[in-house]
């Protein structure tokens, strides 16, 4: 549907040939599969989706063009130059498919776009209405799943399937019946030499009752065996029935117990994570660097705090977690009495000067694709100061954009979370 909407908006002109649209759909489907197989591509795809000014020679455009030409060999006959907006439309359509298939993919899209969107560093062009809806859906899907996993839902209607308690009574289906036919032959045998049809019973009594005591001597042990057999059969069947019913009941009870234990373990983990976040926020100590944030330059502390918090919380975490980070770094800036609102160039310059090597702990960023802010943070942390031109071409961001230290930390944190989610999708 996203692809049709983009065409309706006049983003791409493919003429009146319906087969061309089908070829675009096919290419979008192929690229969506590629995003599933190579989730690293979701980040640069998102960055291209939110920027209609990305150079047509961007490697991702080249990759998508190859997929389109495979489905539509004569595309270049229709489009002499590389059809950037057509390729971008296919990328947007593939992202729409990706976010609906996996909440982690939705988290990658949301986290990647959150910073640029908040600070108006996006250029959506004619596709604005479609992309804004895409980002909103990605945020909703990711946040809903993150809140559920974090155990923050309180409404009974929001509980996960299978968690409801049951008050259903358990009825045991017990059977112990012994039929007449099962002991008739034994009873005939105890009573006399044969039955009314002259057919002998089991272990027949050689005497008839009119023989007196002689018959009774033969009858007693045979009748005892009949009664014992009847009782044993009934008891055996009752035991088997009871065993089966209890096994079914206990299996159900065990399942409920296992479920309860899992819920308690999950709840314990969630509560411990919250406690760890609060402890970290109050302590203002960086486990990664091994010192107090107070001892670090504020830009370095902001990046270290983002990395430390990412090590505490899951990759798909509620949006509120990033605000804990923002408030923590804001409190730190007040403690350090630092100028809190600075251009991005200031933060990157301070990171380059400090040369705190975060590269070993940061996830790798593909240098050939459009990069998030995290890519420049990694370069700066290794001592490389980006130029304004280089910064713009790599990220699409304005290097003079001013951010508070808390906002800078939150942006880096979201980029980190996006990379961690990519790793989970790849696993």
Image (tube, helix red, strand yellow):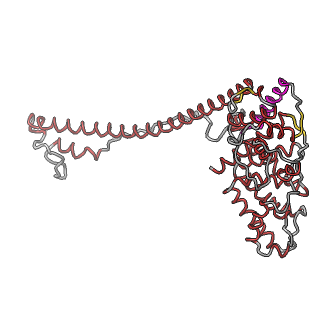
Is residue 367 magenta-colored?
Answer: no
Residue at the location (16% across, 48% down)? Answer: 194
The magenta segment is 317-336
How many numbered marks are there? 0
Residue 352 placed where, x, y %? 80, 40
Name which quarter of the figure residue 33 lies in.
bottom right
Q: Closest to the observer: 310 or 274?
A: 310
Residue 280's place in the image compared with 219, above or below, is: above
Residue 332's place in the image compared with 99, above or below, is: above
Q: Closest to the observer: 159 or 194?
A: 159
Residue at the location (71% across, 63% down)? Answer: 30
Can residue 157 be seen by looking at this rendering? no
Can residue 286 be seen by looking at this rendering? yes
Residue at the location (65% across, 32% down)? Answer: 270
Residue 158 placed where, x, y %? 71, 38
Residue 182 placed where, x, y %? 28, 46
Overall secondary structure of the magenta stretch? helix
Residue at the location (68% across, 42% down)? Answer: 360
């Amino acid at each position: 549907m996203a692809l049709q909407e983009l065409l309706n908006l006049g983003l791409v002109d493919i003429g009146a040939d319906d087969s061309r649209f089908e070829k675009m759909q096919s290419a979008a489907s192929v690229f969506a599969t590629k995003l599933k197989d190579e989730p690293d591509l979701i980040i640069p795809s998102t960055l291209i989706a939110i920027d209609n000014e990305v150079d047509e020679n961007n490697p991702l455009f080249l990759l998508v063009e190859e997929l389109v030409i495979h489905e539509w060999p004569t595309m270049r006959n229709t489009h002499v130059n590389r059809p950037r907006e057509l390729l971008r439309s296919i990328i947007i359509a593939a992202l729409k498919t990706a976010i609906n298939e996996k909440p982690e993919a939705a988290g990658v899209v949301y986290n990647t776009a959150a910073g640029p969107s908040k600070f108006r560093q996006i250029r959506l062009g004619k596709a604005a209405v479609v992309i804004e809806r895409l980002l909103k859906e990605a945020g909703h899907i990711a946040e809903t799943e993150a809140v559920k996993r974090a155990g923050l839902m309180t409404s009974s209607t929001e509980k996960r399937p299978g968690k409801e308690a049951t008050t259903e009574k358990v009825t045991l289906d017990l059977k112990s019946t012994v039929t007449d036919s099962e002991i008739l032959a034994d009873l005939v045998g105890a009573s006399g030499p044969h039955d009314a049809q002259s057919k002998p019973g089991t272990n027949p009594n050689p005497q008839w009752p009119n023989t007196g005591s002689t018959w009774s001597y033969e009858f007693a042990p045979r009748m005892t065996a009949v009664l014992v057999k009847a009782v044993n059969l009934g008891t055996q069947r009752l035991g088997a029935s009871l065993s089966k019913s209890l096994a079914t009941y206990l299996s159900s009870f065990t399942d409920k117990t296992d479920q309860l234990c899992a819920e308690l373990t999950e709840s314990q983990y969630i509560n411990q994570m919250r406690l760890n976040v609060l402890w970290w926020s109050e302590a203002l100590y960086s486990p990664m660097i091994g010192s107090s944030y107070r001892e670090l330059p504020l830009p370095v502390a902001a990046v270290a705090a983002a990395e430390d918090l990412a090590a505490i919380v899951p990759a798909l975490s509620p949006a509120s977690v990033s605000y804990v980070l923002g408030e923590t770094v804001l409190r730190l800036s007040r403690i350090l009495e630092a100028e809190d609102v600075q251009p991005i160039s200031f933060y990157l310059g301070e990171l380059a000067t400090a040369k705190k090597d975060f590269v070993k702990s940061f996830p790798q960023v593909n240098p050939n694709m459009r990069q998030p802010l995290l890519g420049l943070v990694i370069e700066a942390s290794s001592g490389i100061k980006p130029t304004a031109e280089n910064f713009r071409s790599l990220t699409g961001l304005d290097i003079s954009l001013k951010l508070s230290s808390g906002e800078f930390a939150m942006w880096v944190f979201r980029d980190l979370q996006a990379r961690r989610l990519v790793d989970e999708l790849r696993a």
